[in-house]
Amino acid sequence: MNLTTQQIWQEVWADILTSAGFWQIVIIFGACAIAWAVNGVLRTYVRKRAQDIASAQQTLEVAIHGINRVLFPLTALVIVWLAKMSLAHWQHTSLLQLACHLLLAMAAIRLAVYILRYVFSPSGWMKKTENIIAATIWTILALHLSGLLPELLGALDEISFTLGKSKVTLLLVIQAVLTVVITVIIALWLSRIIENRLMQSANLNPNMRVVLNKVLRIVLTVFAVLFAFSAIGLDITLLSVFGGALGVGLGFGLQKIASNFISGFILLLDDSMHMGDVITVEGHYGVVSDLRARYLVLKKLDGTEVVIPNETLIVNPVINHSFTDHKARVQMPVQVSYDSPLELAMRLIEASAKKQSRVLIEPAPQVLLKGFGENGLDLMLSLWIPDPEEGSSGLQSEIYLDIWRAFQENKIVIPYPQREVKILQS
């Protein structure tokens, strides 16, 4: 056990039942109470400020979540540390020293969990990762307070192996992995902050926002990895070998993956497809719900989602029903008998379409005479809807039902096939 840790524990056992220990405990509880009150005031302030911002709901939730998880231990840590520095001239401060270690570990755990939840979507592995982070930090703190941490680090440093001409220790490998992971997560965290700002910008079109977000995330991740390698003393010129191998792999086994990634950037840059567009590709009709670097997510009207590789959208024809205008036309055939009043039937059909709230007034619904059919007059109702992503089957059913009722009231007949059979006598 090292001298500093040994002195802390000796002072703890010596002060635990004395007035010095009592006042240290009072300071710790007081610091926690003050930190809790400060957090309450800041939460109220953030809520009031965010009410004036139209798009501040997500920012509000993130800010309050960060205050709840991170600011409390940090505030208490600052108060305890200041009290420790002030009382160190008159009495022992071992309990305050222990409290500083515990609050620092709590702040580190909450900050790590907060960053992970901010960067990644909630999932099963996130919960396991959070538990692993908490267990690791508490284990390191326990080893430090017990004085075993220096001995463990020395043992890890003695385990070594040769990599090429260099001698690598197990401690160096662990440090390298932790450095890379931490720097990459910080880079993703920064990219998410900038991404949220970009997505709220009204001066950029949606595709350009997605492109900038993806490029920014890639650039920050690459710089984070290079910085981590430099921090652990690894010569980054060795990455040229890896880059060459990666280029060969892309040329052979990974050419489809590379093609999908390149196609994704082409789709985003040429402004041919946007989030929310209604498209038909390879028989799949639906709404573009997500544009990724490798694939597109198409949400069909029945709720199912189709993952379509970006290369398919480049090579095959795609019908974009909302390319120039988001509204869509719906055509409904209707047939009436030759004995029915044609003009009245056309007016009734048009009135049935105008009754529906989803049907646009401009352009107005039209009823056209398409031809003289074998059994009756062929009419076509043409109307426009502003939300094709909601589907049109229900709307057509309601319009047909209203047309049927109107025809019944006005004695208009919908024809059915009729045949005349003549028997010729020889």
Image (cartoon, rainbow, N blue to C red):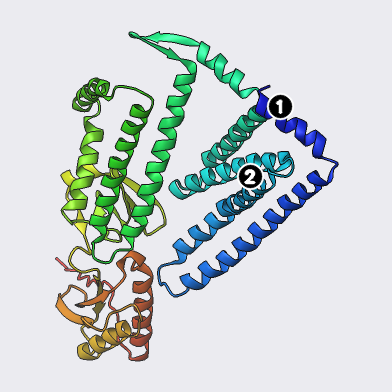
Q: Where residue 80 sits: x, y (%)?
A: 65, 49
Residue beneath the point at 75% across and 47% down: 24
Residue corresponding to mark 1: 6
Q: Where residue 292 sits: x, y (%)?
A: 31, 47
Can you tell which of label 1 and label 2 is closer to the viewer? 1
- For the C terminus, the image quarter is bottom left
Q: Secondary structure at mark 2?
A: helix
Q: Is residue 212 visible?
A: yes
Residue beneath the point at 56% across and 20% down: 153
- Farthest residue toward the right? 17
- For the N terminus, the image quarter is top right
Q: Is residue 312 visible?
A: no
Residue beneath the point at 62% across and 47% down: 81
Tag 2: residue type?
A: Leu
Q: Which labelled disc corresponds to residue 103?
A: 2
Q: Earlier in the sequence, mark 1 or mark 2?
A: 1
Q: Where residue 127 sits: x, y (%)?
A: 56, 41
Q: What crowding class fits label 2: few (fewer than 14 Cα within 10 Å), some (14-19), or many (20 or more)?
A: many
Residue beneath the point at 21% across and 59% down: 320
- Does residue 61 appear to the left or right of 41 in the view shown? left
Tag 1: residue type?
A: Gln
Front residue of 178/329: it is 178
